[in-house]
Amino acid sequence: MLKALIFDFDRLILDTETPEYLAWQNIYSEHGYELPHDKWSKIIGGYGLSNFDAAEYLSLLSQGRLDSVSLNTRQRLECDAAIARASVLPGVLNYIHEAKRLGLKLAIASSSHHAWVDTHAKRLGIFHYFDKVI
């Protein structure tokens, strides 16, 4: 008998991958380069398929004219702002409400930092639905 549902946070409850990609894509384009999708796709989800570093790569493309630390700082600011404007992905609230109606326990599982998950779950107004955040 089903007793609980576990939700992955990033990419299921909240889309954090698209803002990451779009911020880098914007920065690359602004400097006349294209973010290499084939390299980027290998780092999505933190699976360790690649050690591609978008800031380092752009710095190399620009022959050092662009500083990777500054690029990372800018990307993080743009990405965080986009994520802060994002809402719960479609269908998630329906699943949460139905699970609660059925008396199921709910948990969030994530490889992201606890503070990241908790902050966004609270901002999204869903934190109180979950019995555990792991």
Image (cartoon, helix red, strand yellow):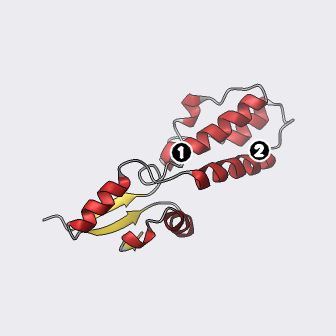
**Can I make out residue 131 in this image?**
yes
> In the image, is 29 to the left or to the right of 17?
right
* Rendered location of residue 105, percent (x, y): 28, 70
Q: Quadrant of the C terminus?
A: bottom left
Name the kind of residue labelled 2 in the image. Leu
Residue sitting at x 68%, y 26%: 34
Secondary structure category for the residue under label 2: helix
**Is label 1 or label 2 in front?**
1
* Element marked by disc 1: helix
Quadrant housing the N terminus: bottom left
Q: Quadrant of residue 99?
A: bottom left
Position of residue 104 relative to residue 13, above or below, is below
Q: Which residue is mark 2?
A: 71
Whether residue 51 appears in this view of the structure is no
Disc number for residue 113: none
8 left or right, relative to 113: left
Rendered location of residue 49, percent (x, y):
50, 41
Q: Residue at x 43, y 65 (%)?
A: 126
Q: Quadrant of residue 113?
A: bottom right
The residue tagged 1 is 17
Q: Nearer the viewer, residue 118 or 58?
A: 118
Q: Amino acid at mark 1?
A: Glu
Q: Position of residue 66 (x, y in %)?
A: 83, 38
Q: Residue at x 51, y 49 (%)?
A: 46
Q: Residue furthest right?
A: 65
25 or 100, which is in the foreground? 100
What percent of the width, then of the height, locates residue 85?
Answer: 59, 52
Q: Nearer the viewer, residue 130 or 38?
A: 130
